[in-house]
Image: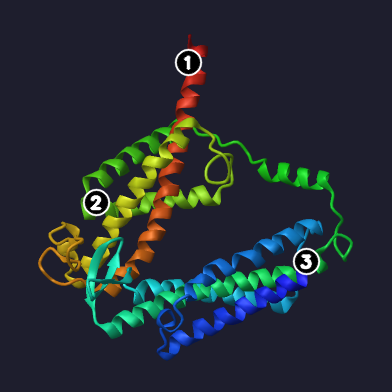
């Protein structure tokens, strides 16, 4: 059965590669093969089978050939590049047909109208993006199925020892406890309040000034491995409670900076800094600027990559500040009985 699933994964990999390559030669696989998107379902059975066989063989460490590692790294890099190009070429949306007309839409919002040739090309972009994922998943499944016997207990590797795994997990979860002084806590409180007020205010220039402190605290959070977010469970209740509002604050902040970058690139810093011109997105027509200028959809889509990175950075940075506030309040509560 393992050989069967390996052959199955190899067939899916070959089909995915063929579909992917065809999109570079003016072929729209959706029109040529209406059921092509069913490959979505075919990539999962061999992947689950590979995980099953690894568990059955009690593989504690994968023994993967060097050429397979190189091929996997290449496919992963190519998948990332393909995703970035899809966002740019697809202009942040997808093709859709309505009442005999062709449109490029995003979550029901019309970006612009398409010709039939553009519609077919956009469909090819969609298949190219998904076929990259099919290729990556089926290649990983094939690699795991091939590596399963080599990684089995007794095949040149360590035997299964539950105590070793338990000790490893305990040592990985043991991080030093974070200590926050009153000065650090009060600084975090001031920075957090200022950032929240600026983000809710919506002024582009002030949102830009939030970039240095948020990025700095995000880097500190990722660099210093101490107990709590983002390296483990939350250390304080306050930090845990702030993650949901911080997520929406990060989205708002990143969206404001994305608009600032676009307007500054096309109209200048003055219009961008003071919000004189804004990006208008409606469900009934193409997106445009508030001064009537049409939106350069590919550039706007490319800036989504920047927006995504800023969302992650904002979420990590603001939640790290929330953890510092929680440690400050915890320290004040522990001091109050001694003063009494």
Badge 1 marks a residue whose secondary structure is helix
* Colour approach in the figure: rainbow
Q: Residue 55: x and y, percent?
A: 76, 56
Marks 2/3 in contact by CB < 8 Å: the verdict is no
Q: Residue 141: x and y, percent?
A: 66, 69
Which is more N-terminal, label 3 or label 2? Answer: 3
Apparent side of residue 86 relative to residue 224 in the rendered image (left or right) = left
Decide which of 115, 68 is in the foreground and name it: 115
- The part of the image, by quadrant, that contains residue 257 is bottom left
Decide which of 32, 11 is in the foreground and name it: 32
Determine crowd level at label 1: few under 14, some 14-19, many 20+ residues with C-alpha closer than 10 A. few
Quickly name the residue at label 2.
206
Badge 2 marks a residue whose secondary structure is helix
Seen from this angle, which residue lies furthest left?
291
Which is more N-terminal, label 1 or label 2? Answer: 2
Badge 3 marks a residue whose secondary structure is helix
Q: Residue 7: x and y, percent?
A: 71, 76
Apparent side of residue 175 relative to residue 246 in the rendered image (left or right) = right
Tell me if I can see residue 210 in this picture. no
Image disc number at residue 336 = 1
Q: Residue at x 75, y 75 (%)?
A: 65
Seen from this angle, which residue lies furthest right?
154
The CA span between labels 1 and 3 is: 59 Å
Apparent side of residue 181 relative to residue 143 in the rendered image (left or right) = left
Apparent side of residue 302 relative to residue 128 in the rendered image (left or right) = left
Quickly name the residue at label 3.
148
Which is more N-terminal, label 3 or label 1? Answer: 3
The CA span between labels 2 and 1 is: 38 Å
């Amino acid at each position: 059965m393992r050989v069967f699933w390996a052959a199955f994964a190899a067939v899916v990999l070959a089909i995915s590669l063929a579909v992917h390559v065809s999109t570079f030669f003016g072929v729209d696989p959706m029109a040529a093969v209406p059921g092509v998107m069913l490959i979505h379902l075919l990539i999962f059975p061999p992947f689950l089978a590979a995980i099953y066989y690894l568990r059955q063989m009690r593989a504690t460490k994968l023994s993967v050939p060097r050429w397979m590692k190189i091929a996997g790294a290449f496919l992963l890099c190519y998948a990332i590049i393909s995703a970035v190009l899809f966002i740019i070429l697809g202009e942040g949306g997808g093709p859709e047909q309505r009442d005999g007309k062709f449109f490029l839409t995003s979550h029901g919002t019309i970006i612009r109208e398409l010709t039939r040739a553009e519609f077919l090309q956009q469909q090819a972009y969609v298949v190219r993006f998904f076929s990259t994922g099919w290729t990556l998943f089926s290649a990983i499944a094939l690699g795991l199925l091939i590596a399963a016997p080599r990684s089995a207990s007794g095949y040149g590797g360590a035997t299964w020892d539950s105590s070793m795994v338990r000790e490893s997990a305990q040592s990985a979860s043991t991080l030093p406890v974070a200590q926050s002084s009153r000065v650090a806590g009060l600084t975090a409180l001031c920075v957090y309040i200022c950032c929240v007020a600026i983000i809710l205010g919506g002024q582009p220039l002030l949102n830009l000034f939030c970039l240095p402190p948020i990025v700095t605290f995000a880097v500190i959070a990722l660099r210093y491995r101490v107990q709590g977010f983002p390296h483990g469970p939350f250390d304080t209740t306050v930090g845990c409670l702030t993650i949901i509002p911080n997520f929406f604050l990060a989205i708002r902040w990143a969206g404001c900076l994305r608009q600032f970058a676009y307007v500054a690139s096309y109209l200048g810093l003055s219009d961008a800094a003071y919000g004189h011109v804004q990006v208008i997105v409606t469900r009934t027509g193409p997106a445009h600027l508030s001064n009537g200028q049409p939106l350069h959809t590919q550039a706007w889509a490319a800036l989504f990559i920047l927006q995504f990175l800023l969302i992650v950075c904002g979420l990590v940075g603001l939640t790290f500040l929330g953890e510092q506030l929680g440690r400050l309040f915890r320290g004040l509560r522990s001091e109050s009985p001694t003063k009494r």
